[in-house]
Image: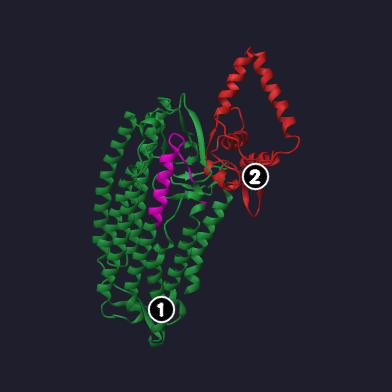
């Protein structure tokens, strides 16, 4: 394994980096979770909110990284590392959310005092052909993931007979086995089954792309349609690549468990972890590049009186969408790239419960 | 075809959808036999309740503009019922009468009609 200090630090740095990157990916008309009419995207209040956000972001970045380093150094190796990682991640998330919340509150105040929505026509728009014309990427992007998943099934299947009755299932920082389990389907194939379930889930999501809600900007529907199309196409490619990296990294780390390169677990652990971080970095950069397209408001849209409706009130804390009058189950995120649940829709709760249940039940089933 | 709904308009949203589909057909942006999104899909794209879209589709179906069924979904299928011309004449009479009452002259009304008609192309009825 990589020294746990490095893993924790890199994770905290990545999380902070994402929060630093997100405001640079969102559309001009959606600043810090606040809907902005195109005529006001150059408002000094937005520039001030952005400066405040990045000042605090830099402070949080330095503090969370320093605290993680100190905690990792003073806590006993391995035993507390998982707890430290979880605690630092949760605290980093909460602090960055707080920073976003402050920027959002500043903008909401400016929006109200300067009456940004006065004299505009709040409009919603839909394109009757968008689901037929928006093409997702080829399913072939799933082939690397499929290949890795098949390896994760075939390798333990070939090794199953030759494995001893008790196998090592965890290795310590020094690369020595520190946890053992009786040879069983679950202990040998557990990880492979998780990868198979994940692969099936990704295929289902890939094939369901046409069903996602497409929210267009009435001030410039053509540009927002092009932006949506690029984000969907490149986002799906990036997610396939991300999971291919994650599964390949996990596969490398699992080889010693199946008796392959059993004495090189340290090297494989480092290689696997590096591979996973590479996948995360590639995915983030890929999405960041895709989200740059049509991000800015053009001159025609700036002059348009027809603007997207002010839907700030449906976003609880700027993060959770709750609109019982909206038939959309998954809606575009307010801050970031991707989709989130409409918690005002009963089906969203059922889906959420199903995901949580699957996350709890599947690991127990395979073990 | 893009459908724009003014959420603060006095005209209900379902009426706006119905009107825009008909205008889209007359202006050639939407064609006969073209598929429209399902009620749930269109409602999700607008961010509104699917009952609103359902109501609009139901109106269009009753008016012989749309065919909705489980297999094919919502498809534009223009039909002209035998009594259509009589009903349309009655509606047009009211609209024209309103213009006359408000003081528009015959030439002005005809010029307006001409200008509006020039934006339309004739869809082929079944």
A53 sits left or right of B115 in the view: left
Which residue is found at the position 55% from the left and 37% from the top?
Answer: B28
Q: CA distance from mark 1 to mark 2?
A: 54 Å
Q: Is residue A181 visible?
A: no
A123 sits left or right of A260 in the view: right
Quarter of image, res A176? bottom left
Chain hosting mark 2: B
Quarter of image, res B50? top right
Question: In the picture shown, does residue A150 fall above or below B119?
Answer: below
Question: In the picture shown, does residue A104 fall above or below A155?
Answer: above
Instruction: Let me know if marks 1 and 2 both belong to one chain.
Output: no
Residue B23's disc number: none
Q: Nearer the viewer, residue A251 or B26?
A: B26
Residue A154's disc number: 1
Q: Is residue A366 visible?
A: yes
Residue A62 covered by magenta stretch: no
Magenta stretch in the rendered image: A211-236
Which residue is found at the position 57% from the left and 26% from the top?
Answer: B116
Chain hosting mark 1: A
Q: Nearer the viewer, residue A5 or B91?
A: B91
State the SS at label 1.
helix
Q: Residue B66: x and y, percent?
A: 65, 43
Of badges 1 and 2, nearer the viewer stands: 2
Q: Which chain is red?
A: B
Q: Main secondary structure of the magenta part?
A: helix
Q: Residues within 10 Å of mark 1 (few under 14, many from 20)?
A: some
Residue identified by numbered label 2: B77
Which residue is found at the position 37% from the left and 42% from the top?
Answer: A26
- Image quarter in which the C terminus of chain B is found: top right
Q: Which chain is green?
A: A
Q: Residue A330: x and y, percent?
A: 50, 49
């Amino acid at each position: 394994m990589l020294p746990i200090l490095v893993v924790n630090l890199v994770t905290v740095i990545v999380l902070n980096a994402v929060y630093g990157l997100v405001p640079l990916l969102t559309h001009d008309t959606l600043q810090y979770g606040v809907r902005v009419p195109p005529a006001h995207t150059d408002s000094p209040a937005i520039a001030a909110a952005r400066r405040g956000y990045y000042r605090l972001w830099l402070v949080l970045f330095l503090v969370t990284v320093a605290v993680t380093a100190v905690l990792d150094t003073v806590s006993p190796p391995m035993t507390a590392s998982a707890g430290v990682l979880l605690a630092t991640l949760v605290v980093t998330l909460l602090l960055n959310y707080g920073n976003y919340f402050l920027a959002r509150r500043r903008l909401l105040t400016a929006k109200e005092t300067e009456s940004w929505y006065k004299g505009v026509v709040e409009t919603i728009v839909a394109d009757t052909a968008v689901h037929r014309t928006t093409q997702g990427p080829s399913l072939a992007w799933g082939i690397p993931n499929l290949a890795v998943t098949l390896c994760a099934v075939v390798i333990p299947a070939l090794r199953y007979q030759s494995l001893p009755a008790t196998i090592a299932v965890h290795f310590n920082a020094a690369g020595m086995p520190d946890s053992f389990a009786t040879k069983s389907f679950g202990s040998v194939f557990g990880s492979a089954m998780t990868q198979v379930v994940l692969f099936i889930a990704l295929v289902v999501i890939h094939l369901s792309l046409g069903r996602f809600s497409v929210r267009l900007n009435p001030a410039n529907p053509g540009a927002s349609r092009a932006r949506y199309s690029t984000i969907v196409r490149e986002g799906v490619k990036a997610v396939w690549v991300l999971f291919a990296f994650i599964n390949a990294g996990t596969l490398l780390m699992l080889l010693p468990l199946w008796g392959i390169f059993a004495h090189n677990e340290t090297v494989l652990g480092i290689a696997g972890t590096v591979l996973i971080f590479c996948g995360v970095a590639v995915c983030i950069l890929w999405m960041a590049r895709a989200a740059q397209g049509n991000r800015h408001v053009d001159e025609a849209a700036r002059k348009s009186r027809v603007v997207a409706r002010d839907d700030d009130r449906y976003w609880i804390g700027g993060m959770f969408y709750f609109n019982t009058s909206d038939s959309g189950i998954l809606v575009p995120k307010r801050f970031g790239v991707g989709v989130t649940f409409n918690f005002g829709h009963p089906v969203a709760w059922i889906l959420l419960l199903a995901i949580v249940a699957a996350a709890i039940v599947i690991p127990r089933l395979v073990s | 075809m893009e459908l724009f709904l003014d959420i603060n308009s006095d005209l209900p949203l379902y009426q706006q959808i119905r009107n825009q589909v008909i205008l889209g057909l007359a202006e050639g942006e939407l064609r006969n036999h073209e598929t429209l999104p399902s009620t749930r899909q269109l409602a999700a794209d607008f961010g509104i309740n699917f009952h609103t879209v359902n109501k609009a589709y139901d109106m269009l179906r009753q008016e012989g503009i749309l065919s909705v069924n489980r297999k094919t979904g919502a498809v534009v299928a223009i039909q002209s019922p035998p009594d259509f011309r009589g009903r349309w004449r009655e509606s047009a009479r009211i609209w024209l009468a309103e213009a006359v009452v408000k003081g528009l002259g015959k030439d002005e009304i005809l010029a307006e009609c001409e200008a509006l008609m020039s934006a339309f192309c004739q869809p082929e009825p079944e």
